[in-house]
Every structure is written in C-alpha cells, then in structure tokens.
Amino acid sequence: MTLISIAITSDPVCPWCYIGYRRLTKAIHLYQRTYPGGSHDDIRITWKPYILDHDAPMQSISYLDRRTQKLGPEKVATSQAHLQRLGILDGIQFRFGGRIGSTLRAHQVILLCERYDVEEGTDYTTAVVEGLFRAHFEEERDITDVETLVKIVEEIVMMGVGLDEGRVRSWLETGQGVGEIEEMAGRARSEGIHGVPWFRIGGENAKEETAVALNGAQDVGEFLQALIRCEGARSVVSGGRGEVC
C-alpha cells in the first residue's frame, strides 16, 4: 500500500477550486479502479488557506454586486455563463444569487476541522470543505455568517464531546486560528502561488517524497497522470496550468 498525500491550496469562494476538486475526485476514483494496486493505496487530502480578496468585508454583500465592482458587468455575465456550462459537466449547478465577503471564518472552520481530525483520528475536513463549496455556489448560503458555518459543520460532522456546536461557535466568534491562517496564506504567496486552486500531489515538498505540482483546475486525465507520476518522479514536477482564480 502506498500513501499518496495531496495538499490543496484554495479559497472557498473560488469557483475553479470547486471544479478542480471535483475533477480531482474523479481522477482518484479512476486511479483506484484502474491502476494496478491503486485500490489499496491510501490517498489523504489536506487543505491550505488562500485569501483571494483581502479587501472583502466581514459583513457579506451581494455576490453579483461584489463581482461587478471587481470585473465590470459585461465580464461578470460572460464569466458566470462559462462557469455554469462547465459546472454541469462536473455535477455542479452554479448559482450566483447569494452573498460574498471575507473568507476568514470559512478558513477558520477548515482549520478547526483539521485539528479535530488529528485529535480524534477522523476524516471530516474534506467533506466540510465540499460542504462550504456547495453552500456558497449551489445553495446561495452566506458562508461569512457564524450560524451558517456552525450549521454546515453540524450537517457533516457527528457532533460530540470533541467538536460540539459551542466549540465551533466559540472558535469563530473569538477569532481563533486567524493569525495562523493569515500566515499560511501569506507564505503561499511568498512561495509563488499567485492563483488557486494549487495542488501538490505526493507530498508537501520534494525532500519528503516525490511530488507533482499542478496549478489550476486541470482535466481529469492530467490529475490521473499526476497520481501515477508521483510514485516514480524523484523531484517536484510541474504540470500544465489550468483555470485559476
């Protein structure tokens, strides 16, 4: 059995991060079904923070208004139509009638869930990240709102003594983990990540084990080849660039 670690640098309001994650999961399923021994490999995903919009308000505003401020009305309409067409192919029903703001609280939730997984030996974080993507892009829920975030975690995690509603709410309301998130996001930029999603398949750095770095929402085939290559390459290999935020 081989352990394949996948580190994903992303932001929950990045549509290409959602598309890229969906394509990666398709590649993982294909790898496990078709690659010799792939069904026995242990594939573990971790999530690294990235802040796309440092000026986004903590109090959310209309998604359409914010995108219009940044891109202009003509580009917004074209971008949304493009994403909706592509999203259907990956099982995503993009909707853009919700609200958007700072993603710090959403990143807090991700960090808390990762810590809980380490404490309890569970594996909830990736499901929570997918829940954040789905809530923002398909359900038009406000993922800047504390109560919404608590509810998303509650829907996915079997809340117990280790991670109850009060712990999640307190973590968010007191700003726990924010400094660490900002430091990690800043480090990502200093290391040359200037668009997300960004994937490192096969380890967090080449000294630990083989690694393949991919920038953007790659095709399923590119992800599949990266999973295969990471076992044989002896240094970081960068693939082609896909769509990024």
Image (cartoon, rainbow, N blue to C red):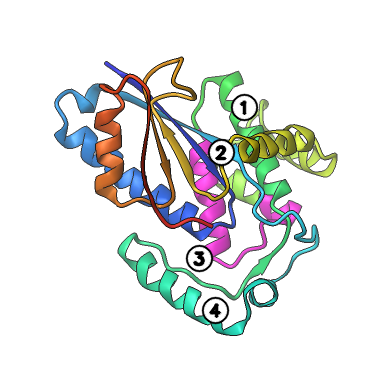
Q: Residue at x 29, y 46 (%)?
A: 26
Q: Residue at x 40, y 52 (%)?
A: 217
First in sequence: mark 1 vs mark 4: 4
SS category of the residue bearing label 1: helix
Mark 2 lies on residue? 157
Pointer 4 residue: 75
How far apart are the two marked residues, 2 and 1, measured between alpha carbons? 10 Å
Q: Mark 3 touching mark 4, by CB under 8 A? A: no
Quarter residue 60 falls in: bottom right
Residues at circles 2 and 1 in contact by the CB criterion of under 8 Å: yes
Image quadrant for the C terminus? Answer: bottom right
The answer to which image quadrant residue 170 occupies is top right
Mark 2 / mark 3, whichever is N-terminal: 3
Q: Which mark is residue 138?
A: 3
Q: What x and y, as percent, mark residue 152?
A: 60, 50
Name which of mark 3 and mark 1 comes first in the sequence. 1
The percent coordinates of residue 165 (x first, y second) are 71, 40
Tell me where the magenta segment starts and ends, as one range: 124-150
Name the residue type under label 2: Val
The reply to whether discs 1 and 4 touch (Cβ–Cβ < 8 Å) is no
Query: In this picture, is 30 found above or below 60?
Result: above
Element at label 3: loop
Above or below, 129 relative to 202: below
